[in-house]
Image: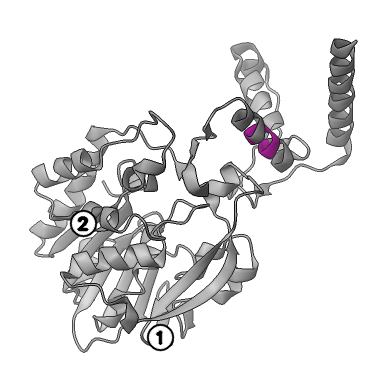
Amino acid sequence: MRNKLIISFFCVLLAVCALAWLFIPDKYYSEREKRTLTQAPKFSASDFFSGKFGDKLETYLANQVPLRDKWITLKTYLKLGIGKRESGGVYICKDKYLMDKFTSYSKKQLTANAELQKKLAEEGIFVSTMLVPVAAQVLSDKLPAYAPVADYAAILKVLSDAGVNVTDIMSILAAHSNEAIYYRPDHHWTSLGAYYAYCTWRGIEPAADEWTKEALCNNFRGTTWNKVPLPSDPAEEITAWYKYANRRVSYNNGEYETDSIYERKYLNGSDQYAAFLNSNQAQTVIQGSGEEGKLLLIKDSYGNTFAQFPVEDYAEVHVIDLRFFRDDIAEYAKTNDITDTLVLYGVQNFVKDTNLS
């Protein structure tokens, strides 16, 4: 009798989903997952007989299943119920931390990415590199038992051996691992974590009380939580750190200009981390508080939080995102009289980013 009830339940469930597919239009973009969803594949005889059509159809159905977000949550709870502590490439850790799984990388691509720094150095441009470890590398005591994670020191050694000037921030972050240096529901570091790294890069002692801290929001759940949407896990606060709240900022050669590095329009949306530097722009120029010197910050999204600190030291900070910037970096540095260059990436992004090489 019990088996019949289970079978009947799933038959009804499949029937409801099939009917829903007929009446609910396909979604183009998932706000929760921050990605474009697969659309219905076009039929062709060659794809059908090769098996490609079946693969595309399977991906489409998985992407467009009705109530997809609710199913992801249910799937996560079912995995937790049977003792699994990993879902969707995310470790479900102690103290409500969700940490992206990062276990392997291409040493060949890593070595190739070191070439950018070497080429800039050959052009007479001083370059330093800072790779932000993933939370799992720093907060390893919170990981599930026997959960593997890539060796941060080994990655830095590859760069050092290639002649790259690397700033190792593992020790400073590890020393403050009992503080809120990473978000629990997102893979990024917090302003506090970025500040400790900034102090190491500058060679100064932390003096957090010299900075004004402003809570931008207190309901932040990031991309990691969206992969493993557990309603029981709390949202967190995003905090801005500054000494001067207003400064001139220009995006993409004057396409958009404003008076703050914090774009508060994002705080009521689904991508609140984008409040730092207006999300990811190809080119940004920030008026600094310093009297001289120009910093070129070549970065991924980890650099958006970091940028709020060196703007207090330099006359200008130029921020470049190579995912969107298409001009010559060396020429840009010379034209804009850049004095210092910092390449700052999350380590898991640096090892696979082909834009660097």
Q: From this viewpoint, is residue 39 visible?
A: no
Q: Residue flagged by tag 2: what amino acid is it?
A: Thr
Residue closer to the observer: 92 or 261 = 92
Q: How many other residues sit within 10 Å of disc 1, few (<14), some (14-19) or many (≥20)? A: some
Q: In which quarter of the image is the N terminus?
A: top right
Say which residue label 2 marks. 129
Magenta residues span 72-76
Q: Quadrant of residue 36?
A: top right
Residue 232: x %, y % from top left: 65, 48
Earlier-in-chain disc, 1 versus 2: 2
Q: From this viewpoint, is residue 242 visible?
A: yes
Mark 1–mark 2 distance (CA, rounded to whole Å):
26 Å
241 sits left or right of 150 in the view: right
194 sits left or right of 130 in the view: right
Callout 1: SS: loop
Say which residue label 1 marks. 248
Q: How many other residues sit within 10 Å of disc 2, few (<14), some (14-19) or many (≥20)? A: many
Q: Quadrant of residue 234?
A: bottom right
Q: Is residue 162 magenta?
A: no
Residue closer to the observer: 54 or 180 = 180
